[in-house]
């Protein structure tokens, strides 16, 4: 299997040796933010595209290294912009869960709703994970950043093109996991979302199908509490996506309405 994957990768590199100019695309990530490749490049940033598939373990295995590189090189606000593009089958809902499970912070384009499949077809991507580096002049300077065994592999690749490490900043107050609290979780319906943040925040509640069932823009100043409820919705997993500036945090919320009825039964029986 390794030999086959290497063979496909070498074919991919050989193909792009004759065509080193990037193909422009505009795509909307699972948070509803639109990204245009040439706009980012023309702004002076390199772009690192992570072509991936959520149900492929080699992609998941590289995520910790990619996450660390993203933070070491400025969280998309310095010399390089990171974006993930699913090559096949993944929906927005799949990416929401994958991002939440793996703590990914850079934008993600699904294969289905986001149009990732068409982008991958335009670039001839046939193997994942593939990490492509595109320079501000639109040249594909690295069509395939080798096999990743550590964060250092990304560092070496980026720094060989003069891309410098930078402090991770979003241009707004730092937005961390510790600033978000959801209680109770699991919930029987109603719950509280508590934020500790200064600045504008977009809060979105998404179901497992990727449908947004609630969205609100909040101007927060310090501690903020929002009471929400899921009465009338089916049991299952929901996702709360909280976006501040270019950084998004995704939290899982489990709705189990039977807990309420079961508690009343146990209380009565006791």
Image (tube, rainbow, N blue to C red):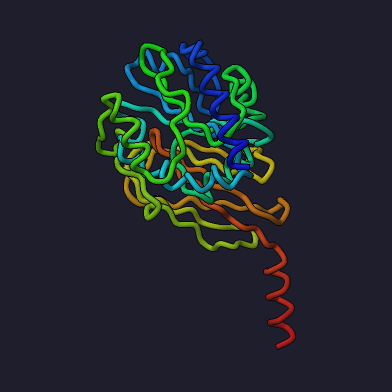
Q: Is residue 56 left or right of residue 138?
A: right
Q: Position of residue 90 (x, y in %)?
A: 65, 36
Q: Is residue 57 left or right of residue 200?
A: right
Q: Who is closer to the viewer here, 231 or 256?
A: 256
Q: Is residue 69 left or right of residue 236?
A: left
Q: Position of residue 10 (x, y in %)?
A: 54, 27
Q: Position of residue 3 (x, y in %)?
A: 59, 38
Note whether residue 218 is visible. no
The residue sitting at 33% across, 30% down in the picture is: 158
The residue sitting at 51% across, 38% down in the picture is: 216
Q: Who is closer to the viewer here, 176 or 146?
A: 146
Q: Please tell me in which quadrant of the rendered image residue 141 appears.
A: top left
Note whether residue 150 is visible. yes
Vertical position of residue 188 compared to residue 177: above or below: below
Q: Please tell me in which quadrant of the rendered image residue 53 appears.
A: top right
Vertical position of residue 85 compared to residue 252: above or below: above
The residue sitting at 37% across, 52% down in the picture is: 179
Q: Who is closer to the viewer here, 18 or 99?
A: 18
């Amino acid at each position: 299997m390794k030999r086959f994957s290497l063979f496909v990768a070498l074919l991919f590199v050989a193909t792009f040796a004759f065509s080193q100019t990037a193909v422009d695309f505009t795509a909307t990530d699972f948070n509803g933010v639109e990204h245009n490749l040439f706009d980012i490049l023309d702004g002076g940033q390199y772009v690192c595209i992570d072509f991936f598939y959520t149900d492929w373990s080699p992609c998941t295995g590289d995520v910790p290294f990619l996450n660390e590189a993203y933070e070491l090189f400025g969280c998309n606000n310095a010399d390089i912009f990171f974006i993930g593009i699913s090559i096949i089958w993944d929906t927005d809902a799949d990416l929401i869960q994958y991002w939440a499970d793996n703590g990914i912070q850079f934008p993600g384009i699904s294969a289905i709703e986001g149009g990732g499949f068409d982008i991958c077809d335009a670039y001839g991507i046939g193997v994942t994970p593939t990490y492509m580096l595109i320079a501000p002049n639109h040249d594909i300077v690295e069509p395939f950043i080798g096999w990743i065994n550590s964060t250092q592999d990304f560092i070496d690749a980026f720094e060989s093109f003069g891309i410098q490490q930078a402090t991770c900043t979003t241009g707004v107050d730092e937005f961390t996991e510790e600033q978000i609290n959801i209680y109770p979780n699991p919930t029987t319906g109603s719950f509280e979302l508590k934020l500790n943040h200064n600045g504008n925040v977009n809060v979105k509640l998404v179901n497992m199908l990727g449908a947004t069932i609630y969205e609100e823009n909040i101007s927060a100043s310090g501690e903020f509490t929002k009471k929400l409820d899921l009465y009338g919705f089916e049991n299952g997993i929901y996702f709360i996506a909280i976006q501040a500036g270019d950084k998004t945090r995704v939290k899982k919320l489990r709705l189990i309405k039977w807990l309420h009825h079961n508690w009343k039964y146990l209380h009565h029986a006791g």
